[in-house]
Amino acid sequence: MDGNLNMVGYGLAAIGPGVGIGLIFAAYINGVARQPEARGVLQGIAILGFALAEALAIIGIGLAFVL
Amino acid sequence: MHLVSVAQAAEEEFQAPGPGDFEFPPLFGEGTFFTKPMLITVLGALAIAVLFYLASRRATLVPAKAQFAGESVYGFVRNSIVGDTIGRDGRKFVPYLTTLFCFIAVLNVAGILPILQLPATSKIGIPLVLALTSWAIFNYVGIRKHGFVGYFKAMMFPPGLPKPIYVLLAPLEFLSTVIIRPITLTLRLTLNMFAGHLVLLLTVLGGEYLLVEKGGGLAFLSVVPFFFSIVLTFFEAFVQVLQAYVFVLLSALYIAGALADEH
């Protein structure tokens, strides 16, 4: 089986952001469930948090190809 | 290189797409700079200029369609991005941030448009320059407001913490704000576009390989990769606009952070 360690590294590195994004959106859903009027305000924060957490997974896959 | 393998139609291994698919030869044979990503960048900039010009001429109080579209984009950046982060002082940054948003969105969406089919922002040079521009702006604005020493003092030594913590906090804050921010801005945008384009290439080339080269009994299985290429195209469209929004939102947040008074 061919492949390289980079991809295994990427797979392991994606665990953290996966959990993080799940937590972020769990908090967003909870917040909107408790107070549906807050949806607009929370949506911006949820998207921001998602992008920041996702950045690490994306850097992982990028460096897996480049290095 | 994949066109070559279609012409041969021999029993070959599937060649997965990789970073080599992002290298483009110069289009008009001359030097090394007018490549496909540059063509897309130039076309995108022209398209934005033309669209905003058409949206703003003969402006009436009750807007017509083009004016409404232009005003919607500008209003979105002005109210929902700058208004919520920097506030009223942010009016002077709205033109830059609107341009940034439109430019990144157009260059990203070029990845799913029929003939262009390359997100020009997947080449690291473009997001690098944009991130460095945002970095220069937020640092300059912060230094101009607080003074050179005051800006770094406010960044590295936020008031109200026990003294020993500053030994750990100050270098980390400096590293995070001055060094890491432009790096993550660049890499987030580039690699999102790189990974998305790569996955689209994988599904389409995989479907084509099953259909043309393997052929025979497995050709009907090519429906699966082609179906996923359609699904992923829609997902890519969402991610492309989202990444443009996130880049601009983070730029606005960094500017707001540089302008913030000490509490």
Image (cartoon, rainbow, N blue to C red):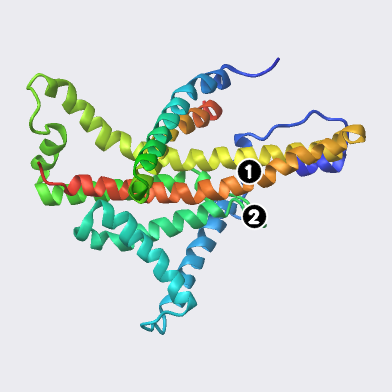
- What residue appears at the point 26 percent right and 45 percent down from the top-left corner? B254
Q: Secondary structure at mark 2?
A: loop
* Residue B22, position as x, y percentages in the image: 60, 42
- What residue appears at the point 54 percent right and 63 percent down from the top-left corner? B43
Please name the residue that numbered disc 2 is placed on: B29
* Residue A3, position as x, y percentages in the image: 65, 19
Q: Quadrant of residue B216?
A: top right
Q: Is residue B190 left or right of residue B180?
A: right
Query: Which one is in front, B122 or B168?
Result: B168
Q: Are marks 1 and 2 in contact (CB under 8 Å)?
A: no
- What residue appears at the point 44 percent right and 59 percent down from the top-left corner? B102
In the depicted structure, whether residue A3 falls above or below residue B6:
above
Three-letter amino acid code of the residue under disc 2: Gly
Chain to which mark 2 belongs: B
Q: Is residue B21 left or right of residue B216?
A: left
Which corner quadrant holds the C terminus of chain B? top left
Give the mark nearer the N terminus: 1 vs 2. 2
Three-letter amino acid code of the residue under disc 1: Leu
Query: Which one is in front, B87 or B198?
Result: B87
* Residue B84, position as x, y percentages in the image: 27, 53
For the image, the number of numbered tags is 2
In the depicted structure, whether residue A29 falls above or below residue B172:
below
- Say if residue B257 shows up in the picture: yes
Q: Is residue A22 left or right of residue B179?
A: right
Query: Which one is in front, B160 or B30?
Result: B160
Please name the residue that numbered disc 1 is placed on: B232
- Say if residue B31 shows up in the picture: no
Which corner quadrant holds the N terminus of chain B? top right
